[in-house]
Image (spheres, grey):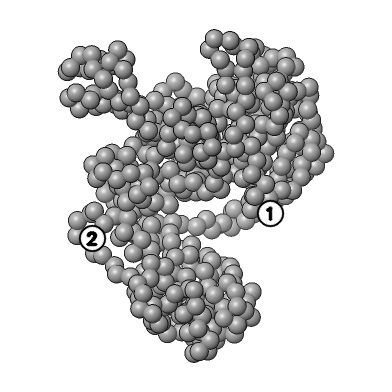
Amino acid sequence: MFGEEPQGTTQFEGCPHLADIDDGRDAFIKKYKTVVTWYMSRLHDSMHHHQAKRRKIGSPACGTCNVVLSRPYVCLRCDYSGCWDAHVQEHLTATGHCFCVDAKSGCIFCSECDDFIYDADLAELYTSILVSSEERYTTFQDSKRKREPYKPWNPSAKDNNALQGAIELPCQGRRGLFNLGQTCFLNAILQSFVANPLLRNYFLSDKHNEKGCKFKDCTCCEMDRLFTEVYSGNTAPFGPTSFLTTTWRASSELSGYAQQDAHEFFISALNQIHATTKGSTKLDCICIVHTTFDGLLQSDVKCEKCGTVTSTPDPMLDISLEIESKGESAGQEVTLMSCLRRYTKPEKLGVNDYTCSKCGRASASKRLSIRRLPPVLSFQFKRFEHSVVDKASARKIEARVRFPSTLNMAEFTTLAMKSQEKTGRSGSHSHHAHHPGPLATYDYDLFSVVCHEGQIDNGHYTCFTRHQDEWYRFDDDKVTHSTLGACLNSQAYMCFYVKRHLDYKPYETPSYMKAREAEVLKEKEREREREREEAARQRELEDDLLATV
């Protein structure tokens, strides 16, 4: 690995021209670091230009046309920077210099290959520069100290011995689930659970073991069995019969063989996992459900007469989004971002709907924002519409909703919206709004999509999930290799995103390490107690022998 080798001994692979660099390898690496670090500093400066005493970093100009470059391409052999359209490639051809780097992405272009190239060591170097930059510039709300430096895990001799005796299991779980009688709603949600990295890490690390559980009809035990089956190495489909019967006993509204709503089962399953897992409490719960899905909304009601703002926090496990709006035209494109902007848009309240503490009855506006983002974001699109007058006349909204593979939630947070109100900027300029930490800490990656096909009374649920960089489609017991494009073009009912950078409290020992250290101390104390008892027995035997003599 690059980080483990001495400086200047990077061994390039892949592009043959990159591997030919000998004399200039150290200068090549140094120039690459300088360019990427410059762009990171410039990006941070542009996002936090409102902060006092922040030095602004200027942009270079093209060496050929003198146009100021917002995204420069820099030659890695000299000081030239230029436009991507033609000038930087013309420079490489004219001078015989082989490589240039995109300052924004860190990608390297080889003029000999006439293409961008990939190298594992340089990709790791780019990641280390990115992390170092974030560590240098990040100050969290709960501390004035900078971000804690990243420390990779290096296995000790004891860890290596333990790993040598471990049983190898498949690193990916792909197994179809039999339809047990209109149970496609259950199968689709279970596949999204399997693809959820936080749930996967929890149950595969034996945090809940069904053999030691005392609960009856325990949904956590069913999750433990599910992950055991999926990661058993057996690729044949299996039927989650015990999961279904446990769900029936726990939630009578979901019992029977009628078609059920996938979102209702999702919420029911989360509630049952919460009720049967370790660490479950009513306040500040640290169970696996709340550490994975729990976020916090904030409702701000502003009196239009005196300007008094009343803020109310509201916990959330997912966000349900309206697809259609009365004020929008029928042909307007629906996207996840437009649904989120509508969800967080100020809403007028009537005079009879709000009582101000100062003015009494008054008109007001209400606005929702996200006060705390969860590690996993779950979105439900409200496709099923039920009439208030005639409950039997339900219909499905077939409109296509476009959703991205990556999502940045900064503009929907409470802090960003308050900053927008102060500066008068709209959501499209939210990258300039104040928020703690780098903008990358608000990035989410899509990992699962639950789809509904057909009509409201005879539809069918399927699921797309991501395993590393590969996408698969699960249609009950049928598992097929798919693509990101097919997933993004599907008729989504629920979307699941995982945070790219998980939050943590800096300079604190993780709870699992504290528990492990406490268990080691207890084991040592038990060992000493056994030794004392053994020594006492030996003394008694010696005393008995002396008395006999």
Quadrant of image for the N terminus: bottom right
Left or right position of 269 against 370: right
Q: Nearer the viewer, residue 523 or 26?
A: 26
Question: Which residue ends up furthest to the top in the rendered image?
Answer: 389
Front label number (1 vs 2): 2
Crowdedness near tag 1: few (<14), some (14–19) or many (≥20) residues, C-alpha within 10 Å = few
On screen, residue 30 above or below 305: below
Q: Nearer the viewer, residue 213 or 105?
A: 105
**Residue at point 29%, 45% (across, down):** 425
The residue to which callout 1 is attached is 164
Distance CA(mark 1)–CA(mark 2): 51 Å
On screen, residue 466 above or below 225: below
**Residue at point 35%, 47% (across, down):** 430
Q: Amino acid at mark 1?
A: Gln
Tell me whether the residue at label 1 lies in contact with that at label 2, contact meaning CB atoms closer than 8 angstroms: no
**The residue tagged with tag 2: helix, strand or loop?**
loop
Left or right position of 12 against 229: left
Left or right position of 147 against 102: left
The residue to which callout 2 is attached is 54
On screen, residue 42 above or below 222: below
Residue 210: quarter of image = top right
Q: Amino acid at mark 2?
A: Arg
Q: Nearer the viewer, residue 217 or 74?
A: 74
